[in-house]
Amino acid sequence: MKKTSRTVRPAVDADHLAKLHHEASAILSLFCSSLTCAASSDGEIRDMLDNMAQDHLSAYLDLLHTISLHDATIGTHFSVPPTTPPVLSVSRQLRLQLVEALLLRHERLESLARTGDSRRFYQDDTLTKEKEHLSTLVHLLTV
């Protein structure tokens, strides 16, 4: 009987993870632009832009759930994301600053995932702390 050879796949594809972080940055940029536009409008237009921002936040939380499935370090810091984002209670200015901080975190994680050094990406204590900070920022954004 002939043995079939099995290829061992890495547990996580760093390129795929980098693409997920890139997509998270893109969604956060859309979220940020919706918040900015809503801040300078009023009435029905503001409501429509706020709804768009909520949709972007939902998409971001869904993608973050996918990222946490691929990166256990991030996954350990999150509970199951809410199915519908809560009505945001923090000020628009604080939301914008939180989104900007999240953008920086995702861009850094994307860059590091692209380096191909998966051992460093998953075992570096500094990166673990950054991933913890990412989860704290998300929590603050969704309270």
Image (cartoon, helix red, strand yellow):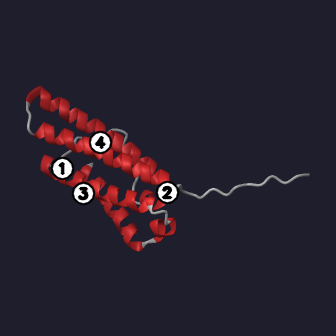
Determine whether label 1 and label 4 are within 8 Å by CB. Answer: no
Circles 1 and 3: CB distance less than 8 Å? Answer: no
Q: Residue at x 43, y 72 (%)?
A: 124
Name the kind of residue labelled 1 in the image: Leu
Residue that protrudes farthest toward the bottom in the picture: 125
Residue occupied by mark 2: 14
User: Does label 1 or label 3 sit earlier along the sequence?
Assistant: 1
Location of mark 3 (residue): 101
Position of residue 11 in the picture relative to residue 130 (left or right): right
> Which amino acid, by three-letter code, is at mark 4?
Leu
Q: Secondary structure at mark 4?
A: helix
Q: Looking at the image, can residue 143 be seen?
A: no
| Number of the front mark, 3 or 2 | 2
* Left/right of residue 35 with respect to residue 121 in the rendered view: left
Dot 4 alpha-carbon crowd within 10 angstroms: few under 14, some 14 to 19, many 20 or more: many
**Mark 4 or 2: the one toward you:** 2
* Local crowd size for mark 2, using a 10 Å CA cut-off: few (<14), some (14–19), many (≥20): many
Give the residue pinned by disc 1: 96
The disc, 1 or 4, on the residue closer to the chain's N-terminal end is 4
Give whichever of discs 3 and 4 has the lower sequence position.
4
The reply, left or right, for residue 84 in relation to residue 71 is left
Q: Which residue is mark 4?
A: 57
User: From this viewpoint, which residue is outermost toward the right?
Assistant: 1
Q: Nearer the viewer, mark 2 or mark 1?
A: 2
Q: Could you give the CA–CA distance between mark 3 and mark 4, rounded to whole angstroms?
A: 15 Å
